[in-house]
Image: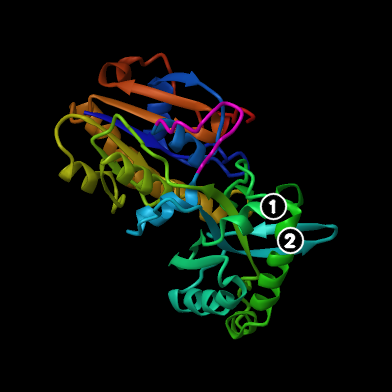
Amino acid sequence: MHLELVVPALFQVQDLPPAAMPALELLLARGRRTNRAASHLEAWLVQAFGLQEISAENFFVPAGALTALAHGLDPGAQQWLRADPVHLRADRDRLLLVPNPAWAVSAEEAHALTAALAPLLSGKFTLQPLAPDVWCLRVDDELEFHSKGGIPAEARPPIELAGADIDPQLPPKPWHRLLTEIQMALYEHPVNTAREQRGEPVINSVWLWGAGMLPVAANGPWQSLAANDAVAIGLARKAGIRHHATGAGASAWLARAPADGRHLVVLDQLRGVHALGDFAALARRLQALEADWFVPLLAALQAGRIGMLTLQVPDAGASFETVRGDLRRFWRRPRPLAMYRITPA
C-alpha cells in the first residue's frame, strides 16, 4: 500500500517550545525530500486532481462548486463561490481577518444569519449554509456577477489569511457596496448581539473566494480519500474516488483500508492556528497528530502494512517519501520539527 498524507502548516511551529514527536521526526529524517513550489492546500488539491484550468500563473480553485458537490448538491452549469462567515477586527490602520478555528458558530446561528441576508441577495445570488462555518453563494444572475468583475482567481481561502491585513485581498470594487450591506445586516442581527454579550467574536462579514463552475473532469491516482475538507471531498466525488471522513486516527483508518493500492489522507487541523497566536492549541493539535497518526503509521511502515508513506506539506513546498528500508538509515538522525523551514511561496 502507498499512503499519501497531506498535512498543511506542519512546519509553522518555530515559536513553540521543543516537543517530543519521535515518530514524525523519524519519518522526516529517514525520508527522501523533494522540493517544489509552495501553495495553499486547495491549489495543491486541484493540481493533484489534474484540473485542466490550472496553470502556473493562475490557480483556479472552484471551491464553491466543489463544496456544493461535496454536500450533495448538483452545481449544474452555474457559477458558485464560497462566502464563508468571518470576524473582521480593526487594528490601528489595518483590518484583520479572524476565521475558524478561532471561534465557533452553531447551525442555528448560521441559518438565522443567512436567512437575514437572503433579501439582499434575492434574484442575484442564493446563499446556502452547507455547514455552520461553510457558506456558498450560487450565482443566479450571470450578468450581475460579471458586471461586478467576478472574484479574482487568486482570492485566497480565509484560513490562509488568519490574522492578516485583508486590504490587498479584497474583491473588486463593484463588490464593496454589497459587502457593506451584508456587514450592516450582520452587525444589527440579534445573533451577533447575543454573541457580543457572551464575549464571543461577532460574525460581521463574509469572505468571498473560490468562484467558478464545476470542472468538467477530475482525476486522481488514489483508490480512496479520507478528508474533512469540502474541496477535497468534492474533487473525490467528481473523480469517482471512494471517500470518507478522516475519523479517529490512523489505527481506525488502517483497520478498514485495503491491503494494497494508493490512498490519500488530508489532515488540516493545523491550518490557521499559528497565525492566530494560539500556541497552546497548536501544541495540542501537533501532539494529537503524533499520537493518532504518526505513531501508528510508523508502526505500520515498520511492519510492512504500508509499503510507502509520502508526507506532503504544501505550504512548505516539500514532500517526504519513505519506504520500510529507509528506516534503517541510522546515520540520518531525527531533528526537531522547528528546524524544518518553509519555502517562500
Query: In this view of the protein, which residue sits in the foreground, 274 or 139?
Result: 139
Query: In this view of the protein, which residue sits in the foreground, 297 or 258?
Result: 258
Q: Is residue 104 left or right of residue 173?
A: left
Q: Report the span colored magenta.
A: 50-61
Q: Main secondary structure of the magenta part?
A: loop
Quarter where residue 55 is shown: top right
For the C terminus, the quadrant is top right
Amino acid under label 1? Pro
Q: Is residue 122 left or right of residue 232?
A: right
For the N terminus, the quadrant is top left
Q: Are marks 1 and 2 in contact (CB under 8 Å)?
A: yes
Q: How is the image coloured?
A: rainbow
- Residue shown at the point (36%, 37%) measured from the top left: 217
Residue 278 seen: no
Element at label 1: loop
Q: Position of residue 220 (x, y in %)?
A: 32, 32
* Residue 287 drawn in magenta: no
Which residue appears farthest toward the right when viewing the image? 93
Quarter where residue 322 is shown: top left
**Label 1 – label 2 distance at C-alpha:** 8 Å
Circle 2 Cα neighbour tier, 10 Å, few/some/many (<14 / 14–19 / ≥20): few
Q: Is residue 335 above or below residue 326?
A: below
Residue beneath disc 1:
171
Residue 34 seen: yes
Residue beneath disc 2:
176
